Amino acid sequence: MMRGVGMAPICRTAAALWFIGCGPGADDLPPEAVPVFAGGAVVTHWTDALELFVEYPPHVRGLEGDVWAIHLTWLADWSPVEEGGLTLALEGPGGAREEIVMPAPARSGVFTTAPVLPVAGIWRADFTLSVGGREYPVPVGDLEVFESVDALVPEEDVASPGLITLLKEQQWVMPFGVAVAEERSIPRSIPAAGEIVAPADGLAHVSVPVTGLVVVQGPTPAPGDAVAAGQTLALIAPTSLDDSFARMQVRVAHAEREAARAERLFAAEAIPERRLLEARHELEVARAAFAAVGGIQAPEGDEAAHLYALRSPIGGVLSERHVAPGEQVEAGAHAFTVVDPATLWFIARLPAREAAAAGGVREAWFTVEGADATYTTDRVVSTGTVIDPDTRTLPLRFAIANPDGRLKVGMLAEGRLLTGEPVTGVAVPSAAIQDEDGLGVVYVEVGGESFQRRVVEPGPSDGTWTLVTGVASGERVVTTGAYQVFLASLGDAELADHGHTH
């Protein structure tokens, strides 16, 4: 009998028994009357790149038995092997050797063969997949070839309680993935909810300081556009003269006239150079003061003497725009909001009962609403010193890099704050843990198409891995597609015709 991971006896069909000499009439037997023989197996074996799941029948010397169903899955994305050739090398007693080449899959992910082995005894079986110029060896194990049909032993019907079946053909057509549980050390953690906010220097609200009209002058930025610090966002033509902006306009105009007059008088030698320099200085001061509040010269020919420029005080992304070209706006109106998304803050709100541990918090991880990605940060900006009397929480601020802009200001977040000495134990990917009626549950792959439901007690987590009880190191747990395994456990999954027997 072949020795490998996840072995189980394979049932024999009436048609298969005909091939090994059980005689005519087997096809006419009812299913419960069809004999079942030991000697075949179901084997699951994993390499670094592939999962092999193979079913084969008992073998009798010189006779063709049922077809081997050889399932190959790429572990990188849990997709079926669609191309390439598979070689089955069989080595038997006395130097006997058989080699069977399957040039392509019989169907997506499945190779088939029905070897006839000429010598009774123990044979060694190994597969090699050749695809894309590379070879992937898959060592399997030993199988027994019986001397005659009379040597076959009826198989005892041994039930496997608690096993859930999800066929390879089902796994291949849905998002699916499996990972290996492993020993890890993870710090203790405290759950904390929070939100994503912009730091004080990463958010700017631009308001209108003067009453006037929004003037069109070239393209204007729209929400979502990147803007630079100092970039003009809009131009305002003031419509009221009873303000300091208008007085600055008048001062600039007066200084320009005085400077021009001084140039003419100096050219006529009517005034000393000192008077000319004083007039130029007054003009520079007036223009600088006007520019400091956003004043700019209007285009030549414009009836307005000057325009007010609304400029972005920071570089970032324009997130809000509340003024439109031609609109009359009042002084103090909110015009634009600019956010620098490169670095944001995660403000975690630590429950008051955990506030004593706040000083030991050095890292945090969190997820945000509507996304599965986990974000981690070890940049503690500040720890609050006052408990909020309404929420009974203590705020902790963490800086989080956001180069791709996926995090948005205002997002709600759920996470954990890491504190204390690490705890060592068996960990599984956090995505493998399902919440079923308040219980932590994982689905363990015990064979290519067999799974077991385990109730676990989640422990410390770093956001990606979580320590659990009830799973051994090296066991494989479902990380993607666990809900489909759950449905299969209820008998509610739609079972497609997978084309091989069990």
Image: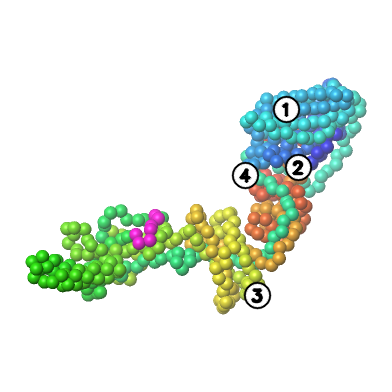
Under mark 3, the amino acid is: Ala
Q: Residue 166 vs residue 392: left or right? A: right
Secondary structure beneath dot 4 equals loop
10 Å crowding of disc 1: few (<14), some (14-19), many (20+): some
Region rendered in magenta: 225-231
**First-in-chain label (4 vs 3):** 4
Res 315 quadrant in image: bottom left
Q: From mark 4 to mark 3, how far is it between C-alphas?
A: 43 Å
What's the distance in space between the residues labelled 2 and 3, CA to CA?
Answer: 47 Å
The image shows residue 459, relative to residue 331, as above or below, that is: above
**Residue holding disc 3:** 356
Residue sitting nearer the eye, 146 or 97: 97
Q: Label 2, on which residue?
A: 447
Percent x, y for residue 501?
A: 75, 33
Write down the quadrant of residue 399 in the picture.
bottom right
Q: Which residue is mark 4?
A: 175
- Provide the secondary structure element on which disc 3 rests: helix
Question: Where is mark 1, residue-wise?
Answer: 87
Q: Mark 1 against mark 4, which lies toward the viewer? A: 1
- How far apart, in angstroms, are the residues tagged by discs 2 and 4? 18 Å
x%, y% of residue 34? 84, 31
The one of 4 and 35 positioned closer to us in this rendering: 4
Q: Residues within 10 Å of mark 4 (few under 14, many from 20)?
A: some
In this rendering, the count of numbered labels is: 4
Report the residue at 55% width, 56% height from top.
370
Q: Is residue 228 left or right of residue 210?
A: right
Q: Amino acid at mark 4?
A: Pro
Question: Which numbered disc, 3 or 1, marks the residue that appears first in the sequence?
Answer: 1
Q: Is residue 258 left or right of residue 292?
A: left
- Whichever of callouts 2 and 3 sits on the residue coming sooner in the sequence is 3
